[in-house]
Image (tube, rainbow, N blue to C red):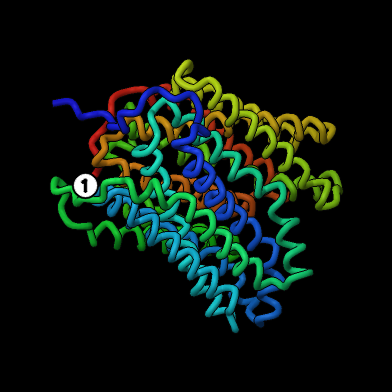
Amino acid sequence: MPLRRSSHNPAPATETIYAPQFLATTMGMFVLVFLVAFESMAVTTVMPMVSELLNGERYFALAFAAPIASGMLGMVAAGEVTDRWGPKHPLFISVAIFCVGLLICGSAANMPMLIGGRILQGVGGGAITVAIYVLIARAYPGQLHSKIFALFATAWVQPAMVGPWLAGLMAVHLGWRWVFSGVAVLVIVAFCAMVPVLKSLDSERNQELGPVSVKRLGLAGLTGLAVISMNLLGNSNSRWSLAGLALALVVALVAIRPLLPRGTFLARRGLPATITTRIFITGAFFGVEVYLPYLLREDYQLAPDRAGLILTASALCWSMGSWLQGRLGEKVASSTCITVGSVAGSVAIATALATALFHPPVLVLVCGWAVGGFGMGMIFPRQNVNMLALSTKEEQGFNSSAMSVADSLGNAGATAIGGVIFALAAAGTGFVAVFSFSLVLVLVLIAMSPRTKGAPALAAR
């Protein structure tokens, strides 16, 4: 018997996410997502100062890797709970955990205490993302999903432009602790705007599903530890780093398989292929982006502020791509947007590779990477829309957590592998080797993207 499609509230067709019945929820979610993204950018800015003041330089890398691992656990736990009780309770709990983590970081007397807070931040932040996906599926009609995800893309991109600057101002004029504690207060204010709609949602137990899977939570923790190892080994110059990275990658892939829909590794048509494309696009795009400022400094002798402008241009075009796909809505299929975005990503990565090989004017790279940002704006929201459209109500949480876990795996895995490739490449060929690896990933993605159109698949339960 065919699976049921996602059931949405039987509301009349609405053309805007800012209609009176959605306005408070829309703005609350936007601010909440913005603050989670801002915190990620802000920590990157202030962590060198924090680690120095707390005499914890040796914990510097762990302060970034820890929330990646704990975020996996938060994503899977939220997926398990939302499928059984809906998004109301998971969102309350995840926001509380996130705020407690922020307050612990803001009051930390030493680096181990701060890392403990960062672990709670990761759990809360990962769970917030999944719970919000399910909230969208339950509270908004399907024709508005592309628009709400376009707004969220803006909420993630804007901190990339203003987050480091604002965090620096806060650290200098208010003290670094306010970068954590001040955000906690704002998160609570944003969440209050969402309380009315959460109260209106049904939270009765779904009797069709069994108890929360402890095994799946354990696998999420193991995947997170493997991802931490991949991050640390990717930045290691040890001769054993390649073997260690390969082992960590195998552990991550084995542990993560039950956390993804069946057929994800085979890119089966429909939902599995949609999840697979998230792994490939995050790996290909961010695996190159982390090296671009380095390339501009090494080959063009640009100052950090000028080199960073390429990322700003990409972020602006990301917002444009998100706006366009939201404007197109159901007029254009999600699989088409994913294919178009994948082609744009290939143009960007090919431009980066050509820059490393032939050293054209910097403007060539800026324009090429802006095209890639536009493509990412087309892809990311439509992957989320497609995932919800191909999910039954009972699997919205599981599939939302699978999408988030795939995001983390693709980003961390490709970055770690790229780090080892860069270290092992012959002198002067590191950028070419890394960019060539990412170009292969995005070409595979182009071939795979038409498979995102299809029937829903059974989740791995």
Q: Tell me if residue 444 can be seen.
A: no
Which residue is the site of mark 1? 461
- Residue at 36% of width from left, 62% of height from top? 221
Name the quarter where the N terminus is drawn: top left
Is residue 34 visible in the rendered image? The answer is yes
User: Residue 437 lies in what quarter of the image?
Assistant: top right
In the image, residue 24 sits, relative to residue 146, either above or below, namely: below
| Left or right relative to 295: residue 270 | left
Residue at image point 37% right, 32% down:
273
Given the image, on which type of amino acid does mark 1 rest?
Arg
Left or right of 14 on screen, residue 160: right
Residue in the image at 80% along x and 49% along y: 298
Judge the density around disc 1: few (<14), some (14-19), many (≥20) Cα neighbours within 10 Å.
Answer: some
Q: Position of residue 130 (x, y in %)?
A: 40, 48
Q: Dividing the picture into quarters, in which one does residue 58 lie?
A: bottom right
Residue extending furthest toward the front: 20
Q: x and y percent of residue 425 in the render?
A: 64, 49
Instruction: Say if 448 sits above or below 417 in the image.
Output: above
**Residue 395 lies in quadrant:** top left
Residue shown at 50%/36% (left/top)? Answer: 149
The answer to whether 379 is drawn above or below residue 293 in the figure is above
Would residue 51 appear left or right of 404 to someone viewing this image? right
Residue in front for this viewpoint, 170 or 267: 170
Q: Position of residue 83 (x, y in %)?
A: 26, 47
The answer to whether residue 369 is left or right of residue 206 is: right
Which secondary structure, mark 1? loop
Q: Position of residue 129 (x, y in %)?
A: 44, 49
Residue 175 vertical placement versus 153 (above, below): below
Number of numbered markers: 1
Residues 15 and 230: in front is: 15
